[in-house]
Amino acid sequence: MENITGLTLGGGVWTPEFATVLDPKKCIGCGRCFKVCPRDVLDLIDRGEDMELDDDEDYDEDDTASVMTLANPRDCIGCGACGRVCPKGCYSYAAMPVQP
Ligand code: SF4
Ligand code: SF4
């Protein structure tokens, strides 16, 4: 199936890669990605028991009590801004087929 593509202002074709995974075991809840997302895809929630940080030795538990989630993944435009500002490499992306 054909992937979703867009056009640049100059008419060049580009293939957006959408945020498909946000790893809660890496996320420190810093909020950087939330600030840059243009589509309100993300939301900060309380960290659940199954979302413990893989490596939290450098962080105070109070500072990492929240974790970011892909609350509205279908609103993602695949701009990649979230991953560019994330200090922990939490995001994974993929091109996606055109939805029926
Ligand atoms: S890729 Fe862009 S639109 Fe999608 S979640 Fe990240 S910042 Fe938001
Ligand atoms: S930028 Fe990365 S570490 Fe910070 S809240 Fe977003 S996903 Fe979590």
Image (cartoon, rainbow, N blue to C red):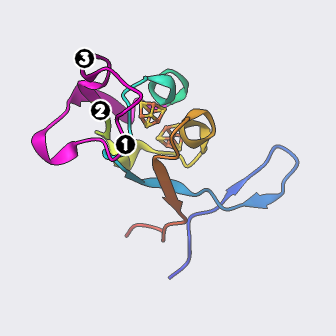
Label at residue 62: 3
The part of the chain drawn in magenta is: 39-66
Most extreme residue toward the left is 49
Determine which residue is flagged by label 1: 55
Could you tell me residue 58's position as x and y percent? 42, 28
The secondary element bearing badge 2 is classed as strand
Vertical relation: 95 (above or below) 38: below
Point out which mark residue 67 bears: 2
In the image, residue 81 sits, relative to residue 12, either above or below, namely: above
> In this orientation, which residue lies closer to the viewer: 77 or 99?
77
Circle number at residue 17: none
Local SS, label 3: helix
Q: Is the residue at mark 2 in contact range of ligand 2, meaning its CB lies under 8 Å from it?
A: yes
Looking at the image, tell me whether mark 2 or mark 1 is earlier in sequence order. Answer: 1
User: Which residue is pictured at 73% across the width and 59% down the height?
Assistant: 14
Quadrant for the C terminus, please: bottom left
Q: CA distance from mark 2 to mark 1?
A: 14 Å
Report whether 19 appears left or right of 9. Answer: left
Is there CB contact under 8 Å for labels 3 and 1? no
| Residue 83 covered by magenta stretch | no
Mark toward the start of the polypeptide (3 vs 1): 1
Question: In which quadrant of the rendered view does residue 84 lie?
Answer: top right
Which three-letter amino acid code belongs to the residue tagged 2? Val
Tag in front: 2 or 1: 1
Q: CA distance from mark 3 to mark 1?
A: 15 Å
Q: CA distance from mark 3 to mark 2?
A: 12 Å
- Ligand 2 is located in which of the four quadrants? top left
The three-letter code of the residue at mark 3 reads: Asp
- Say which of 25 and 22 sits in front: 25
| Label 1 crowd (10 A; few <14 / some 14-19 / many >=20) | few
